[in-house]
Amino acid sequence: MKVNKWTAALASAGVLSGVTAAQAEESPVMTALASTTISGFVDTSMHWNPDEQGSSYGTLPIYNKFAGNKNDGFNLNVVNLTISKPLDESQWAAGYKAELWIGPDAVAYNSSINGDNTSDFGIKQAYVELRAPVGNGLDFKMGVFDTVIGYEYANNNANPNYTRSWGWAVEPTQHTGLLASYAIDDAITFTGGIANTLAPRINNRAQPVKSEADKTAMGSVAVTAPESWGFMQGATLYGGAVYGFNGADNQANYYAGLTLPTGNDKISVGLAYDYVHQNGGGNTSNDSYQNVYGVYGSFQATEKFSVHVRGEYAMGEVISLSTAGDAAEIWSVTGTLQYDLWANVMSRLEIRYDNVEDGQFWFGTEEDDSWLVALNVIYSF
């Protein structure tokens, strides 16, 4: 009879008898735990704003889209703890994922059930995952999951740059609902779902009186060029949309992203576009829109050293307003040097410049220039 190390340790400590250990080893609970994985990371940073001119300068909301003043000092960003069981290859596979955030960034993620936005503990994702034997397999997620659109992720270690893009700043982050995905083949995958709201708050409702009608709809498609496409093999086109209640009014988000082969496996290039239309409380004269264009480039110089750049142009305005100063424009460029000297550690030095022209309507800041020099160190386990 085979007894795993965890059960054996409990038995040797006297917590379980030999008989109990054998029973535990063969129980459905222990079988499920055997396929559970634990992972996560600890994310830290240092920010320096070299030309800070006031208490509000340098606090552009895009600096990770998280609240709290990180200027000119050392920061704990977040501790991520993920417990999961991925789907296996069986026809009726089942699994789950619980991704927890602890620390300052969890406060601003605004995922708390009551929406008080004061706790430094947040649930980033928590869902049950199921597969039904329909065609190639129809997969479902029910619970709290990441949004289906965007080039970047909330987790810093999943992105080429430390700070997030302006495109990410205007996108939803998470939803509570049901999401289905289906892969026609290795080249085309469809995703679609329904959620309570576009806003991130867990279990929130758009309109409590008629919540059965006011739901958020989302969908996406990913197309990867097959080998028969020659030099375009591996190129990926991704498009998606989310429409629903954003916490104040209805909002529509549209996204398109493209990654392109370069002929050099050390160089990667990506393009991203976001369009957002926000309803003005039923009054079209108060509607607003935003466009964000992004260009990404990465160069893997050596096994440990890489260079990443991002350029963006963003603009938007309230539709009814045409006087000078009502439109907003932003030019942004970010350069990141990454050197992975220690095992499991991502260490990055980043320089970022943002030029904001009259951005108070939806960027949350007045006209200004902003520089940031940041050191980001993340340990992943």
Image (tube, rainbow, N blue to C red):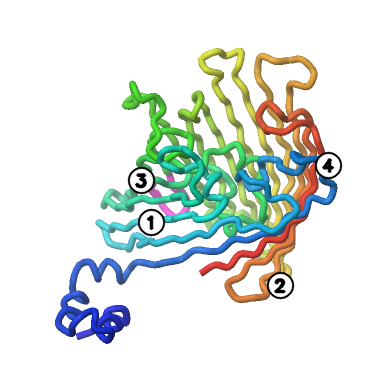
Which badge, 4 or 3, is on the more N-terminal residue?
4
Q: Main secondary structure of the magenta part?
A: strand
Residue located at (42% from left, 66% from top): 38
Is residue 296 left or right of 235 when viewed as pictured? right
Q: Which residue is mark 3?
A: 143
Query: CA gap, disc 1 to disc 2?
Result: 34 Å
- The answer to the question of whether label 3 and label 1 lie on touching residues, with beta carbons closer than 8 A, is no
Q: Which residue is mark 2?
A: 302
Which badge, 4 or 2, is on the more N-terminal residue?
4
Q: Nearer the viewer, residue 364 or 223?
A: 364
Q: Amino acid at mark 3?
A: Gly
Q: Can you say whether 304 is above or below 62 in the image?
A: below
Q: Secondary structure at mark 1?
A: strand
Q: Amino acid at mark 4?
A: Gln
CA neighbours of label 2 inside 10 A, class few (<14), some (14 to 19), many (20+): few
Residue located at (18% from left, 85% from top): 18
Q: Secondary structure at mark 4?
A: loop
* Location of residue 143 by image quarter: top left
198 in the magenta segment: no
Which badge, 3 or 1, is on the more N-terminal residue?
1
Query: CA gap, disc 4 to disc 1?
Result: 44 Å
Place of residue 280 in the rendered image (x, y in percent of width and height, measured from the top left): 56, 18
183 in the magenta segment: yes
CA neighbours of label 4 inside 10 A, class few (<14), some (14 to 19), many (20+): few
Q: Which residue is mark 4?
A: 53
Q: What's drawn in magenta, residue-wise?
A: 180-190
Place of residue 104 in the rendered image (x, y in percent of width and height, measured from the top left): 57, 51
Q: Which mark is residue 97?
A: 1
Q: Amino acid at mark 1?
A: Lys
- The answer to the question of whether label 4 and label 2 lie on touching residues, with beta carbons closer than 8 A, is no
Q: Amino acid at mark 2?
A: Thr
